[in-house]
Image (tube, helix red, strand yellow):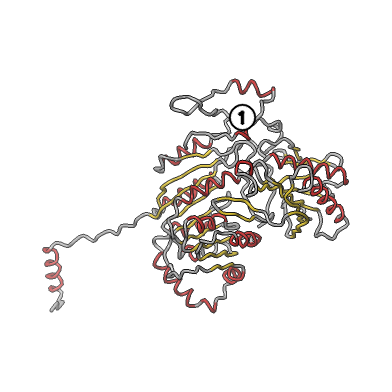
Amino acid sequence: MPLFFLSTAPPPISRHVYIPPSSQPPSLPPQQQQQQQNLKLTTTSSNNNNSPLLACALSCPHFESCSGCTHEFNLQRPIIVDEATNFLNTLGVKDFTFDTCRLWGWRCRAKLAVRGSSNNPLIGLYQEGTHNVVHIPQCKAHHPNINSAVELLRQGIRELNVEPYNEDQGTGDLRYVQMAVTTHNTSLPQSERYKQGKVQVALVWNSRNEISSSSEKLKNLAKFLWRNGGPRSDIHLIHSVWANFQTSSDNIIFGNEWKHLLGEQDFWEHAGGIDVSLDPSSFGQANTRAFDSLLRKLQRYVPYGASVTDLYAGSGAIGLSLAATRKCRSVKCVEVNKESRPSFEKTVGRLPNHVDSSISWHHADASVEPLSWLFGSDVVIVDPPRKGLDASLLQALRTISSTEKKAKSSLDSLLSKEKEEKRPWVIRAKVGSVQIKSKTPYEDNQSLPQTLIYISCGWERFKQDCRSLLSSRAWYLEKAHGYNFFPGTQSIEVLAVFRRAEVTKKKKPKSKPGKKKKKKDKRMNYGVDLA
């Protein structure tokens, strides 16, 4: 799946706020101090003793020019939380909770444009509505080590005379950089792992491949980063250096070719109780701490021993965490981006020894014949992009009750003709799949899911999908929780739990004896012999 560069950050109710000591903001700049004095400071403790401060300020010097964050104050509770609370209240969810998560230094994955000149490189985000890059060396959303790695990269660009990309002319060497922080280092105490995170640097080079006139500059830049930020430097900052090759003139960040240059090849994070592998080409959550909190909550709604289908699965972090923590009978992950497969295979290799699930990953589009993916599942999990559920999948979920019998007969037909399968999308899914069989023999499960867990990063589309699911009367909304995945923005990540609604068959009214007799007499009058 191509990745696009966005000029803004990607797009929340219990009222306690956790502010990690290491993430406390610095003093406000002078121009913001008056605004801060005018804020009402409210607390949530019933006894008003030692209550956390709710009026949390971004305190970022780049706020007015950078497009990444959209509001400065009350980071712990964006305005959209009130809208979400009211909306979900109307649907019967009276106990909506919101986890504020980490408020500063939360972003562990950043894609940044590189522009300017070799003497003065600009590394940051586009200014709102333009393609002018704003340099953001003191970004308060970034993990601090991302800012340090960016500064080290700027030094290398200047020393080695590396030319930043010129969008108008299509010239230059370095187009973008992706910085990803791993905070999973088991050699460190738990309390130190986040602070001591190491940065994987992926350089997007303006070339078709590593054989080009500027390839020597690329190698030298990688060596500079490793020499000055690797394990033998004064400050070990860099985890690894990768190169991606891209010559497209549009806004697609990454090309199809990747090259590992220096450092560790495997990148690990710990989320949802398992070690998760993330290649630079695969999707990874920017806010790893918030994602871990969401996974821990999600696990509570999946019964032990359930069969799970994970749609829009990426590298399978959600499904595999359930295999480990809920002892699932089967976990089926479906993902359209084939680049996620290597990360999935590595993650499976690190699952705890006690995991005895039938696990599979399929390179397929969940919108094509979605019922075939839903069959055999007790729980289906959907984690779509901001555009929401594909129309065909949404329709399959809406009509799941009425089509159950028809779908079962269709599945039996498909299974009987499996050997002569000719549909290209099915063949591709099989060729690109990964299968790990369980050691325990289980009977085939041909049920349809009774639980739907929807993870949404697009609030407006979630509302539409939610209304559509509920209006079908096939589902009801049981629980919903919000997460502050992107503090400083008006966005909210929602974990919604739907359950299948019971379908009650209408009983035919019993006929009165008198009416039966009348009907009998009537038929006899027409010469009908009932003997």
Can I make out residue 351 in this image? Answer: yes
- Residue 196 appears left or right of 368: right
- Residue 93 appears left or right of 353: left
Quadrant of the drawing holding the N terminus:
bottom right
* Amino acid on which the number 1 mark rests in the picture: Ala
Which residue is at 58% across, 70% downward?
A: 430
Question: Residue 10 sits in which quadrant?
Answer: top right
Q: Which residue is mark 1?
A: 57
Looking at the picture, tell me which residue is in the foreground, 368 or 124. 124
Quadrant of the drawing holding the C terminus:
bottom left
Could you tell me which secondary element the residue under label 1 belongs to? loop
Which residue is at 52% across, 49% downward?
A: 295
Looking at the picture, tell me which residue is in the foreground, 137 or 515. 137
Instruction: Estimate the x, y position of residue 175 in percent, counting from the top left.
Output: 78, 49
Instruction: Estimate the x, y position of residue 452 in percent, counting from the top left.
Output: 45, 54
Which residue is at 39% across, 55% downward?
A: 500
